[in-house]
Structure formats: C-alpha cells, structure tokens
Image (spheres, helix red, strand yellow):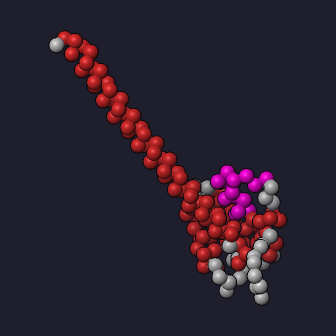
Amino acid sequence: MRYLKKYIIPSVISGLLATIIATGITIYWTKSYEKERVIVDYQTRILRDVAGFRYILNFPDRPGYERFVSAFNQIPFAYSESPEVINKYNEFVKIRSNSGFSEEVSNQAFANIIFAMMDKLAIPRDKVGDSIVKQVFSVGNHS
C-alpha cells in the first residue's frame, strides 16, 4: 500500500495532468492556426478576385463586374488588421470619387492596393512591377 501511495498514485496524477495540459495546449494552437488560415484564405481570395477582374474596373457593363465590386468592397473587412492596405484602399476610393485625378493617378492607386495586399500576404513581388499590374489581359472581342 505504501508503494501504491508513494509511486503509483503520483505517477497516475502527473500523467493525467500532463495529458490535460497537453490537450489544452493542442486545442488552443489548433484553433489559433485554423483562425489564421481562414483569414489568410479570405484575404487571398479577395486579392485573387480584385487582381483577376481588374480588366473590368472601368467597364461596369462587362460580365464579372459585380464580382469585382463585391471583392473590392470586402477589402476593408478582409484586411482590417493591415493599416497599409486600409490606407491604400482609402486613397483609391478618394481618387476614384474625385474627377480631378487623372487615369494614371487612379491606376497607380489601384496598383498600390494590389501591392499592399501582396505584401500583407508575403507574396513575393520583386518581378511584379507597376506595368504588370496595370497591364490588362482579356480574351475575346470587347467592343
């Protein structure tokens, strides 16, 4: 009985405590990782849609315009914890709502949003310059 009280019971209790603590830590890490993964997936989808549908930025009558506008309007929510993206978004909205700015200024502001989102997601952009972001590629005859 003495052996049981001195060795077995403390071993069982320490094993149970270690299991409980390890399980708690694992659950916490898993939830934290999952939350971060969901946020990054959301941000990536927004970047993909905004960059992918940029060819219709000035053509509201083309197919896909609603998807572009929807993705663009989600930028402040998807990137709410990124002051740089929010600043670039606000600059672009200000420029687009003021007819005094040139098309080049508007295009540069748009490119700046794309670059800020890429930076937030740590997507390398050393070979993606303004000319690539501003260059629009579309297939088909758009008259």
Q: Position of residue 73 (x, y in %)?
A: 59, 71
For residue 121: magenta?
yes
The quadrant of the picture occupied by the C terminus is bottom right
- Quadrant for residue 30, please give it: top left
Question: Which residue appears at 67% of the width and 51% of the height?
Answer: 122
Q: Position of residue 106 (x, y in %)?
A: 76, 72
Q: Position of residue 124 (x, y in %)?
A: 73, 52
- Quadrant for residue 142, please give it: bottom right
- Quadrant for residue 84, please give it: bottom right
Q: Position of residue 95 (x, y in %)?
A: 72, 72
Position above or below: 1 against 20: above
The residue at the far top in this view is 2
The reply, left or right, for residue 1 in relation to residue 37 is left
Question: Which residue appears at 44% of the width and 48% of the height?
Answer: 31
The reply, left or right, for residue 104 in relation to residue 117 is right
The quadrant of the picture occupied by the N terminus is top left
Question: Which residue appears at 32% of the width and 29% of the height?
Answer: 17
The residue at the far bottom in this view is 143
Q: Mainly helix, strand or loop, the magenta region? A: helix
Magenta region: 112-126
Question: Which residue appears at 48% of the width and 47% of the height?
Answer: 32
